[in-house]
Every structure is written in C-alpha cells, then in structure tokens.
Amino acid sequence: MDYIMTCTSAELALLVTLSGYPGVAKGIAEASVGEKGHKEWEAIMEVTTHQLILKQLWDDERESKGEIPLRDEIQQFIQNYVESKWMIRCSNKGQSNILMIHHIEKDTWMTHIIDRDIIHEFTYIKGADIPNIIRNYYSFSEETIVRAQLFHLSDQAFDLLSEPHNAGKVRKISSFSPEEEQSFRLFLDDLESQTWSLYNISVFHNPSIEADPILENIVFFLPSARGIWVVEYKDHPTAPVQVALNTFEQWCDLLNSVGIEAAGVNGR
C-alpha cells in the first residue's frame, strides 16, 4: 500500500479543477456543500487555495510561469483518479463513510475512502489487496452459524422488501416451506435492525468522463449476529433470488471472487 493524501472535498475539487476537469470538480463540491452562487464559490476556492499552500501542495514556481501550480505527481494522481475506467463501490450502512476502489492501470488500484462527504483519503494498492481491504472495511464478526438458513424469493418479492409494510405481502406471494419461513423471519429481524436497507458491493465501468457509469455487477448482503446474509440470483423460473446466511469463511470466499473479478479488469 502506498499512501497518497488526505484532503477535504473543497481541496479535492480545486485540485481537480486546476488539473482540467471542472465538471468533475463541480460534482465533488456540490456533493459536500450543495449548490453555491459564483461569488460563494470564489470565496470558498480562495480559502481552499490557502489550505493547499499550507499543505505544500501548491507550486509557486509553476504559478509564476503561468503553469498549473501543482507538482507532476499531484497532477498524475488527479488524472488517475478522474479517468479511472473501473470502480468498486462498497456501501456501509452502519458508518458515515464509503469505500471506493478505482482501477488505475494493470494491477494498480486506488482506494478512496469518503468520510461524511467531507474528507477523502487516497492510497495506491495492488489488486491482490482488494479482498482484505474490503473485509477490514466491514469488519464483520467471525461468528459461526448454528444451522443453515435459506429461502427464495421472486424478483417482485425481493423488490417489495425495501419497505417494512410489505413483509406480509411478500409472505403471501412466496411459497415458503416451514424451514424457509423460519429463515425469512430471522432475515426480517436483521433487516429491521439495519433500517430496512441492504449493504452492497457494486462494480462499475466508466467508459468516459462524460458518460454515466455502467453497473456491471452488484452483490447485496446484510450482517447478522449469526453470520452474513448474502443475496444471489440462481437459475429458477419463479423464485430466482436466493437469500442465504453465510459463514464468515463463505463471506471471505465471496470477497475473493470480487478480487478475481477485479483481476479480470486488467485484460479488458
């Protein structure tokens, strides 16, 4: 791992602007402080310039020559970040931060932790580090499962579970066995404890800066005191959504598969 920097959203937006990506910078800034008028942005950027000078990220000599006032390695870092073609996004419902992992080139990736939409921390890593980084990010318990828990849902039933009042309707349109009914009840308890929101790890392809990212793959999951619930799609005509309580070892195997998928990006 090779630490790059920690900065605020305003500092990152200014670095991105100076490096020639004003549209991207606008999105970064507005995600943090919302839309501002022209004069307000000028005031924010003036203060932020002083912060970059204090952090020794501002190159006075380059500025005096009319050049971009950033060292080559900073400009290269911004280019790598903005022009990354592949990204893994890890949501964390229980925390105020989010983990992004951007592909740079060959086996080089960049972790990007965003804390409260304010603080950004960047580190270069290797593809082989990805499973461990995601596992440490979530830090799920290594509790073992007493007995297997498993049930199946239709696409419609799975979509309905985003709202707590739909639980009864899901039961009516699903043909649960007694064992599946027990598993479903345990899952609902865990879902309620997470405010009816699933975690997910998403893989996006960014063909260009101007285009919207394309969702290539997504894995839904939910931590439990008994293990980790994992949602997978299976080849089934009426109930393709399988929800199973995984052991910690199975969870680690899942993250290894994310690492394998990331390794495949190198050849695309």
Image: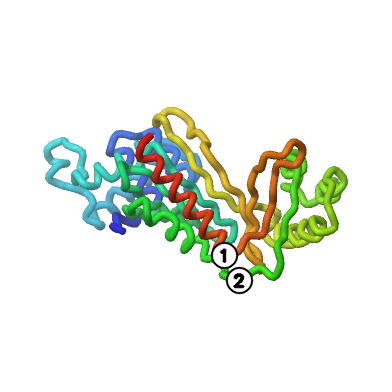
Q: How is the image coloured?
A: rainbow
Residue drawn at (15%, 47%), measured in percent from left and top? 60
Q: Is residue 49 above or below residue 185?
A: above
Marker disc for residue 98: none
The percent position of residue 46, horizontal first and vertical second, equals 31, 46
User: What's the amino acid at mark 1?
Assistant: Phe
* Residue 182 % position (x, y): 80, 61
Q: Earlier in the sequence, mark 2 or mark 1?
A: 2
The answer to whether marks 2 and 1 mark residues whose Cβ atoms lie closer than 8 Å is: yes
Q: Tell me if 120 is positioned left or right of 124 in this view.
A: right
Residue 39 visible here: no
Provide the secondary structure element on which disc 2 rests.
loop
* Alpha carbon separation for disc pair 2 and 1: 7 Å
Q: Is residue 172 above or below residue 115?
A: above
Is 119 positioned to the left or the right of 107 in the image?
right
Residue on which the image places disc 2: 143
Q: Tell me if 192 is positioned left or right of 67 in this view.
A: right
Residue at left offset 41%, top offset 30%: 207
Residue name at image x 65 percent, y 43 percent: 233
> SS at mark 1?
helix
Q: Amino acid at mark 2?
A: Glu
Residue receiving disc 1 = 248
In this figure, what is the number of numbered marks? 2
* Point 45% across, 44% down: residue: 261
| Coordinates of residue 125 in the picture (x, y in percent) | 33, 54
Residue 16 spot, x, y in % from top left? 33, 41
Q: Quadrant of the N terminus?
A: bottom left
- Residue 186 in view in this figure: yes
